């Protein structure tokens, strides 16, 4: 974390335009949070959305889309859950036990990491008044605990407001990508940050999930940064 903050910013914000939010961009665990897990698990999807940090940073630096990035792992506190969600401090994820979170001081995690992250995000969005918000995540080709292979290369999630998602689904499809429409999970259930910061304020957004095996290298991250920036630029114009 930088200066003890649970978030960091990349790129220069301006009034209007497009911004990016990445709740699961970091695998950092502060020394004061003993999770009791093997260190290599921090490079697993249960700790971080693989590839998202690289994509978001490239969108910010090369495509003028500033980003608000989490700087703590979702194993510390899941910033993409409601405060009262039972897994806001997860004790298990995709078959992996997180023993240090059993009996954890949930209120302490919320006050130290969760609330400052969301309060700063709320103020940033009020200040920048974006035309479109990108909520950027990545998903696994298949869950470790089983299930079918996930064929989608990119997916759009949404809850009640699908204005931007409908345009984006069409535009990504026109590029030849296999696009998931509220797949591999539904935005009616997993949309906490955009429910709070976008839908509640009438702000258009694209909640985008990219399959992790497509954004593991710098070249792949650059490719998808360019694709997402282009499509979301056209989405913003379509909504204008």
Image (tube, rainbow, N blue to C red):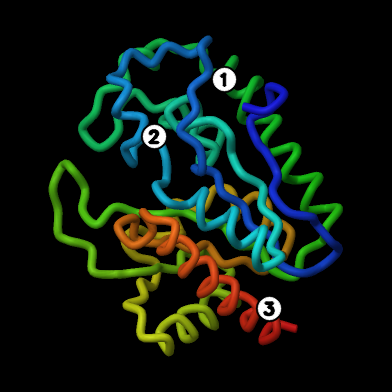
- The spot of residue 184 in percent (x, y) is 31, 61
* Residue of label 1: 109
State whether residue 216 is above or below residue 88.
below
Report crowding for label 1: few under 14, some 14 to 19, many 20 or more residues within 10 A (C-alpha). some
Q: Is residue 134 left or right of residue 38?
A: right
Q: Quadrant of residue 9?
A: top right
Nearest to the observer: residue 41 or residue 85: 41
Label of residue 209 in the image: none
Spatial CA span between label 3 and label 1: 36 Å
The kind of secondary structure element at disc 1 is helix
Q: Earlier in the sequence, mark 3 or mark 2?
A: 2
Quadrant placement of the N terminus: top right
Tell me the residue at 53%/10% (across/down): 32
Spatial CA span between label 3 and label 2: 32 Å
- The spot of residue 172 in percent (x, y) is 45, 81
State whether residue 162 is above or below residue 24.
below
Label 2 or label 1, whichever lies nearer to me, is 2
Tell me the residue at 46%/69% (across/down): 223
Q: Are marks 2 and 1 in contact (CB under 8 Å)?
A: no
* Residue of label 3: 236
* Residue of label 2: 47
Nearest to the observer: residue 231 or residue 117: 231
The kind of secondary structure element at disc 2 is loop
Report crowding for label 3: few under 14, some 14 to 19, many 20 or more residues within 10 A (C-alpha). many
Q: Earlier in the sequence, mark 2 or mark 1?
A: 2
Spatial CA span between label 2 and label 1: 16 Å
Tell me the residue at 66%/52% (across/down): 67
Residue at the limit of the structure toward the front, as seen here: 219
Report the number of discs. Answer: 3
Tell me the residue at 68%/22% (across/down): 4
Q: Is residue 75 left or right of residue 8?
A: left
């Amino acid at each position: 974390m930088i200066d003890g903050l649970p978030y960091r910013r990349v790129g220069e914000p301006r009034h209007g335009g497009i911004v990016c939010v990445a709740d699961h961009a970091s695998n950092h665990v502060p020394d004061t949070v003993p999770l009791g897990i093997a260190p290599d698990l921090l490079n697993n999807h249960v700790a971080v959305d693989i590839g998202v940090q690289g994509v978001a940073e490239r969108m910010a630096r090369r495509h003028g889309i500033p980003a608000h990035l989490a700087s703590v792992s979702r194993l510390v506190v899941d910033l993409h859950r409601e405060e009262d969600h039972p897994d806001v401090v997860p004790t298990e994820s995709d078959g992996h036990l997180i023993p240090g979170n059993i009996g954890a001081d949930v209120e302490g995690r919320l006050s130290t990491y969760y609330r400052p992250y969301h309060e700063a995000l709320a103020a940033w969005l009020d200040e920048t008044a974006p035309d479109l918000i990108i909520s950027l995540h990545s998903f696994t080709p298949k869950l470790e605990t089983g299930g079918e292979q996930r064929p989608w290369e990119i997916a759009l999630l949404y809850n009640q407001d699908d204005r931007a998602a409908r345009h984006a689904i069409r535009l990504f499809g026109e590029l030849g990508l296999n696009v998931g429409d509220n797949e591999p999970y539904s935005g009616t259930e997993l949309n906490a940050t955009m429910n709070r910061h976008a839908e509640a304020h009438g702000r258009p957004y694209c909640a985008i999930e990219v399959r992790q095996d497509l954004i593991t290298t710098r070249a792949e991250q650059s490719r998808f940064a360019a694709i997402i920036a282009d499509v979301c630029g056209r989405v913003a114009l379509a909504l204008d």
